[in-house]
């Protein structure tokens, strides 16, 4: 045990620290004193956070905990759409911009809180006219256009849980989700713009609902104007139907535990899990965390979360959190390199974005494209940067800080999951000293611990193991849709009585948390536990490496051997140069971490296989590295990547 701990603490030797900028700390939404006080009484803290929202009926108590099922604010009643829209209009902020939307082809829309409220009321009236009712599921399969936000809020307004399916998913993926939650209405578009071209969506819906007799209506937003098939008994144009509805709609208050949405996420088995989130606890968590972690000043900030609404980050930090707080957000439809690789930074300059929230994979892609691209734009409006989705390598963190944040903006590295609903571990920018690669501390009201294999709570100093949450929190997964047993088994059986996150983590000597990747990404080399992320960070810190992914493959001598897939910066190399490059990298890792972390094999590749949400698919890389049959590749952004990678393998490995 102590051997493993000391190995990890030796490996993670990042020592750079960045205290909160004085000006930000002085005016922060959460100050150091407030942070201290907040941590003292968990339930009292969450009760105060709930009071930031507008409730139609007060709760009986804060928490009814019947492990592993939590009911937050039982008997409390509220309407999510009212909290996100009407109450801001009633408070005199109707003319504040809710969304500045930028289309990929260059079109844009500015939508105020009043206009968004009107459109959501119209869409809610339409859904009711189509027979949708509280509790009945609505599937949403849309590109990143304002109607996606309108559709989600219209569902929330009438209490019909939505299931948003990422527009990049196939007809088959859409069908299984519609079927699993028995959705009756589907909201889609003719298509959306991606990489400069109109890509179809409606065709996938047609294929998906062919086998879903329960679907009564398909509502179609016209975005691209491309030709689509039409079924007059079922299909309706959004613009014809929504526009003629009344702008008046009285929101009904729902029970705090009323279902708000189901979001599917992949598990260890083939069948995706429908993560169910409910109303009062979820909105409390996302509103408080969005306000505190991003230090949001709704009157002056322009906030931009680059996620797609098809992922939980889009749900919590494009839609529900920011709108509950009355924020002004930017929303962008397309890809970062269309029509040029500076598009994101051009949008930051144009809209004077002050807070940006993105993913390490995007940051590393921008690193690969080169410093000179963001340099061409005025990024001085930025004051805070966020990261989410996977551990961020210290080198990517430093690049983000220097090249995007101008060396002055704090970076909040936020750890959470689809299941947690919102951010649980993150620095607060006015309180904590940030370290490149560390997600810092659990937020107030969050009880995180690190356990060892034997279920022992590790001391909060120089110790590594499994991240668990020992107390329920508002916004936590309510269950897996239709499968309470699977919910118990996946999250509550590894360590009975506590929530098992599936991530490895470490407390450093200051008591800060470092996420080490999914526990199945931790390798065991000659009895030493080495996290894939540590070796990746070391590789990426080499000046000639743009991106790297590391996996363990079975090895008769050492148990596992480290295999690295590396994308070089700049031009391709000849074979001889490749050999030299691989040797340099091995030496580099050996000197950075130690000889035990030296990759046994280094494969130079042009691309890495990623899920649509941008996570590297290490499972596939492991399969390639161990020469096993490839598993399911349907969620790859580009499945030809695997062929490229396979070509690099020695035939008689
Ligand atoms: C929000 C989101 C959850 C998994 C999670 C972990 C990884 C997310 C992270 C992070 C290290 C961070 N993850 N944020 N790892 N540092 N700041 O991404 O949800 O798609 O469900 O993924 O992502 O492994 O368990 P989701």
Image (cartoon, rainbow, N blue to C red):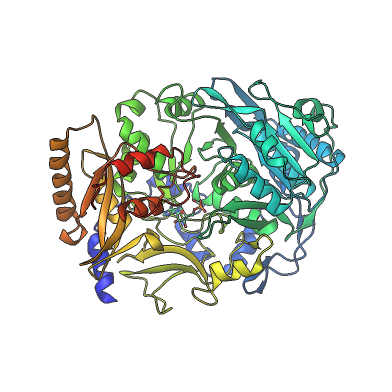
Q: Which of these two is toward me, 632 or 297?
A: 632
Q: Is 420 on the left-hand or right-hand side of 117?
A: left
Residue 228 appears at what percent x and percent y? 69, 25
Q: Residue at x 39, y 62 (%)?
A: 520
Residue positioned 75% across, 34% down in the render: 219
Give the x, y percent position of residue 483.
66, 65
Query: Image check: 241 left or right of 525?
Result: right
Instruction: Give me the residue at 14% from left, 54% from top.
Output: 591
Q: In the drawing, does residue 136 fall left or right of residue 333? A: right
Q: Viewer-proximal residue, 467 or 249?
A: 467
528 up-or-down from 337: above or below: below
From this view, report whether residue 340 is shown above or below residue 251: above
Q: Position of residue 539 (x, y in %)?
A: 24, 47
Above or below 433: residue 540:
above
- Asked whether residue 325 appears in the rendered view, the answer is no
Residue 194 appears at what percent x and percent y?
A: 52, 28
Q: Nearer the viewer, residue 131 or 603?
A: 603
The quadrant in which the N terminus is found is: bottom left
Decide if residue 558 is in sight here: yes
């Amino acid at each position: 045990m102590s051997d493993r701990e000391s190995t990890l603490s030796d490996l993670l030797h990042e020592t750079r620290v960045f205290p909160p900028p004085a000006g930000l700390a002085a005016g922060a939404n959460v100050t150091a004193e407030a942070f201290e006080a907040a941590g003292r009484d968990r339930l009292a803290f969450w009760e105060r956070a709930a009071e930031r929202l507008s409730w139609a009926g007060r709760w009986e108590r804060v928490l009814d905990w019947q492990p592993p099922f939590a009911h937050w604010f039982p008997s409390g009643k509220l309407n999510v759409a009212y909290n996100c829209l009407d109450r801001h209009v009633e408070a005199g902020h109707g003319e504040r911009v809710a969304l500045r939307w930028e289309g990929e082809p260059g079109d844009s829309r500015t939508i105020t809180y009043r206009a968004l409220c009107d459109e959501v009321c119209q869409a809610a009236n339409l859904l009711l006219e189509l027979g949708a009712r509280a509790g009945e599921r609505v599937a949403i399969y849309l590109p990143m256009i304002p109607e996606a936000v309108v559709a989600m809020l219209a569902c929330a307004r009438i209490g019909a849980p939505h299931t948003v399916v990422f527009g990049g998913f196939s007809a088959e993926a859409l069908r299984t989700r519609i079927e699993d939650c028995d959705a009756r209405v589907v909201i889609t578009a003719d298509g959306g713009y991606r990489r400069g071209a109109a890509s179809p969506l409606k065709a996938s819906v047609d294929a998906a609902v062919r086998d879903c007799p329960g679907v009564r209506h398909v509502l179609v937003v016209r975005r691209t104007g491309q030709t689509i098939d039409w079924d007059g008994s079922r299909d309706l144009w959004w613009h014809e139907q929504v526009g003629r509805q009344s702008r008046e709609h009285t929101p009904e208050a729902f029970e705090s535990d009323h279902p708000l949405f189901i979001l599917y996420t992949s598990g260890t088995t083939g069948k995706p899990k429908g993560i169910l989130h409910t109303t009062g606890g979820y909105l409390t968590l996302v509103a408080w965390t969005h306000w505190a972690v991003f230090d949001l000043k709704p009157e002056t900030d322009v906030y931009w979360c680059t996620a797609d609404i098809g992922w939980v980050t889009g749900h919590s930090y494009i839609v529900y959190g920011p709108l509950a707080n009355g924020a002004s957000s930017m929303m962008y439809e397309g890809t970062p390199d269309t029509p040029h690789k500076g598009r994101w930074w051009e949008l930051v300059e144009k809209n004077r974005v002050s807070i940006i929230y993105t993913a390490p994979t995007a940051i590393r892609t921008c690193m690969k494209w080169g410093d000179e691209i963001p340099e061409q734009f005025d990024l001085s409006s930025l004051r805070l940067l966020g990261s989410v989705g996977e551990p961020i390598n210290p080198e990517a963190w430093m690049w983000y800080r220097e090249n995007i944040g101008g060396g002055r903006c704090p970076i909040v590295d936020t750890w959470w999951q689809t299941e947690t609903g919102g951010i649980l571990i993150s620095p607060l920018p006015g309180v904590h000293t940030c370290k490149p690669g560390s997600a810092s501390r659990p937020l107030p009201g969050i009880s995180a611990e690190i356990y060892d294999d034997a279920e022992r709570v590790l001391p909060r100093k120089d110790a590594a193991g499994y991240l668990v949450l020992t107390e329920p929190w508002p916004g936590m997964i309510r269950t897996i849709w239709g499968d309470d047993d699977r919910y118990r088994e996946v999250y509550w059986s590894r360590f009975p009585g506590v929530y098992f996150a599936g991530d490895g983590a470490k407390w450093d000597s200051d008591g800060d948390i470092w996420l080490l990747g999914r526990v199945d990404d931790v390798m065991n080399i000659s009895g030493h536990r080495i996290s894939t992320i540590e070796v990746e960070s070391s590789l990426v810190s080499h000046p000639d490496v743009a991106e790297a992914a590391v996996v363990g493959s079975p090895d008769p001598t050492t148990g596992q051997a480290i295999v690295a897939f590396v994308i070089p910066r700049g031009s391709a190399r000849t074979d001889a140069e490749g050999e030299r490059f691989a040797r340099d990298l091995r030496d580099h890792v050996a000197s950075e971490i130690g000889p035990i972390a030296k990759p046994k094999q280094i494969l130079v590749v042009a691309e890495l296989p990623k899920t649509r949400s941008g996570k590297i698919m290490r499972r596939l890389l492991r399969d390639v590295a161990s020469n096993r049959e490839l598993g399911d590749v349907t969620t790859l952004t580009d499945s030809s990547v695997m062929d490229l990678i396979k070509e690099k393998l020695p035939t008689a490995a």
